[in-house]
């Protein structure tokens, strides 16, 4: 991938300054009505009531809670829902999640950005000779391989969280061949979508990678996992520009998922 792709990458695959599965590997272990053993269903449970935005802000990861990551506001903010539109409506849940927006119609949502701590490239230089023979340049390139994840929490009334998660899993299958859309006026194209293994947290989850068309023949993956905890969804949208440029694999950071899941128990 050419270094000039970095600018396009930030514009097409990230939310703000990030600004920023189901074909195989999604687990959907949501509870089902077991019935009363007499051919009918069990007594109806009270409809789940969504958490408020204030309650979600207390539950989302905060500064100092994720080892090796700096947690703070999403740089540039997440685009408004109405400014994100896919050409094919069935793929809209994917474009939402790739933009850091919760799928479906949540009653409340909030977000944070988790950025992997940077390593000083001079740490790998042991002498002036290292700085001259390419070691320093290699260290600089490696120091760019850092995960940036937008974490979004969204709460839903009733079975809204289950329906929203289903819409994502359905879209992973329906949009496997790729899709296009517009985010805040910028057109973006994903050439393919593939399901991935989930983290195993929560009551049910969907994970996938969407390959972004960066232009000039360049492509790069964006990784997403959506996890349901009761009637709350935790969304992890992850990008690693350095890994993309170096053609190296990366994934949704497990340490971020683990830290957020612990706060939702």
Image (cartoon, rainbow, N blue to C red):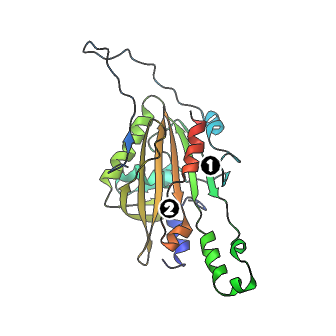
**118 above or below 235?**
below
Q: Mark 2–mark 1 contact, CB under 8 Å?
A: no
Sequence-wise, the earlier of marks 2 and 1 is 1
Image point 61% across, 62% down: which residue? 17
Q: Is residue 154 left or right of residue 172?
A: right
Q: Which mark is residue 199?
A: none
**Residue 10 position within the rendered picture, expressed as x and y whole percent measured from the top left:** 55, 67
Mark 1 surroundings: few (<14), some (14-19) or many (≥20) residues within 10 A: many
**Residue 27 position within the rendered picture, expressed as x and y whole percent measured from the top left:** 38, 42
**Residue 245 position within the rendered picture, expressed as x and y whole percent measured from the top left:** 52, 73
- Kindly give the residue lying farthest to the top in the view shown: 38
Q: In which quadrant is the C terminus drawn?
A: top right
Res 126 seen here: yes
Q: Quadrant of residue 77?
A: bottom right
The kind of secondary structure element at disc 2 is loop
Nearer to me, 187 or 243: 243
How far is mark 2 from mark 1, CA to CA? 20 Å
**1 above or below 173?**
below
Res 100 seen here: no
Image point 42% across, 50% down: which residue? 207
Nearer to me, 76 or 229: 229
Image point 63% across, 33% down: which residue? 55
Q: Which mark is residue 250?
A: 2
Q: Quadrant of residue 175?
A: bottom left
Q: Is residue 71 left or right of residue 179?
A: right
The kind of secondary structure element at disc 1 is strand
Q: Which residue is mark 1?
A: 112
């Amino acid at each position: 991938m050419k270094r000039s792709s970095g600018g396009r990458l930030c514009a097409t695959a990230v939310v703000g300054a990030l600004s920023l599965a189901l074909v195989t590997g999604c687990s959907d272990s949501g509870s089902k009505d077991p019935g009363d053993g007499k051919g009918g269903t069990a007594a109806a449970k009270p409809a789940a009531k969504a958490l408020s935005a204030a309650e979600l802000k207390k539950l989302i990861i905060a500064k100092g809670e994720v080892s090796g990551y700096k947690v703070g506001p999403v740089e540039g903010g997440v685009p408004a829902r109405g400014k994100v539109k896919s050409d094919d409506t069935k793929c809209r849940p994917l474009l939402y999640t790739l933009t850091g927006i919760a799928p479906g119609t949540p009653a409340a949502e909030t977000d944070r950005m988790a950025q992997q701590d940077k390593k000083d490239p001079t740490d790998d230089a042991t002498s002036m000779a290292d700085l001259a023979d390419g070691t320093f340049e290699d260290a600089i390139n490696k120091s760019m391989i850092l995960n940036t994840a937008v974490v979004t929490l969204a709460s839903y009334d009733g079975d809204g969280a289950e329906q929203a998660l289903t819409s994502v899993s359905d879209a992973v299958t329906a949009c496997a061949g790729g899709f296009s859309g517009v985010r805040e006026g910028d057109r973006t194209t994903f050439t393919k979508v593939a399901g991935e293994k989930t983290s195993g947290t929560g009551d049910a989850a969907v994970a996938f990678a969407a390959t972004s068309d960066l232009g000039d023949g360049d492509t790069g993956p964006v990784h997403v996992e959506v996890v349901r905890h009761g009637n709350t969804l935790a969304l992890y949208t992850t990008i690693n520009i350095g890994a993309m440029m170096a053609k190296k694999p990366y994934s949704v950071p497990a340490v971020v998922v683990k830290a957020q899941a612990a706060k939702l128990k």
